[in-house]
Image: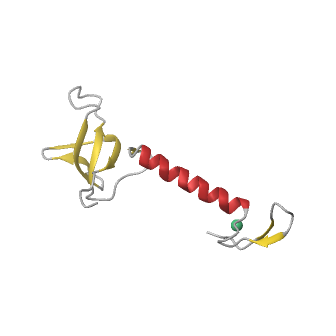
Amino acid sequence: MACGIPFHDERGDVQDCEPESLCRRCLLGIVREQAGELERLRNPWRKTADELPEDGANVCFVTECPNDKWYHGRVLGGRFMAGEFGGFSVPGLMVRASHWCPMPSFQG
Ligand SMILES: [Zn+2]
């Protein structure tokens, strides 16, 4: 995570950016990464427009089929199949989804 580039510390001394003394840019990078991780824990739902699950992954998803009032906007649990004819599926149904999140794991 340390870039190794020299920088001026708060006393004006020159330091090399190392794991024990990180430059401001590296510190900010860590803070942003942690903030992103926290946000993911707080809200595990991901937009399919931003990111898709791995092929064959078990996921929960929000159906997106505006012409079908019964299924549109429902949360279902099933599997994601990648590819041209893929989508989010439960037995007997393959649909588009607006959001998905990983299925909770019972293996800790
Ligand atoms: Zn650095």
Tell me residue 84's x, y (percent).
30, 53
Hey, which residue is sitting farthest front in the picture? 11
Which residue is drawn at the image coordinates 85% and 62% (left, top)? Answer: 11
Which residue is drawn at the image coordinates 22% and 45% (left, top)? Answer: 77
Hey, which residue is sitting farthest right in the picture? 12
Indicate whether 67 appears above or below 30: above
Image side of residue 52 versus residue 1, left or right: left
Question: What's the image's color scheme?
Answer: secondary structure
Tell me residue 96's x, y (percent).
29, 41
- Who is closer to the viewer here, 22 or 65? 22
Quarter of the image that includes the C terminus: bottom left
Which residue is drawn at the image coordinates 55% and 56% (left, top)? Answer: 33
Tell me residue 28's x, y (percent).
66, 56
Q: Which quadrant holds residue 63?
A: top left
Tell me residue 79's x, y (percent).
23, 52
Which residue is drawn at the image coordinates 67% and 62% (left, top)? Answer: 26
- Who is closer to the viewer here, 8 or 81? 8
Which quadrant of the picture is home to ligand 1? bottom right
Indicate whether 106 appears above or below 43: below
Q: Which quadrant holds residue 21?
A: bottom right
Image side of residue 13 versus residue 49, left or right: right
Quarter of the image that includes the N terminus: bottom right
Hey, which residue is sitting farthest left in the picture? 92
* Labels in figure, total: 0
Hey, which residue is sitting farthest top in the picture? 69
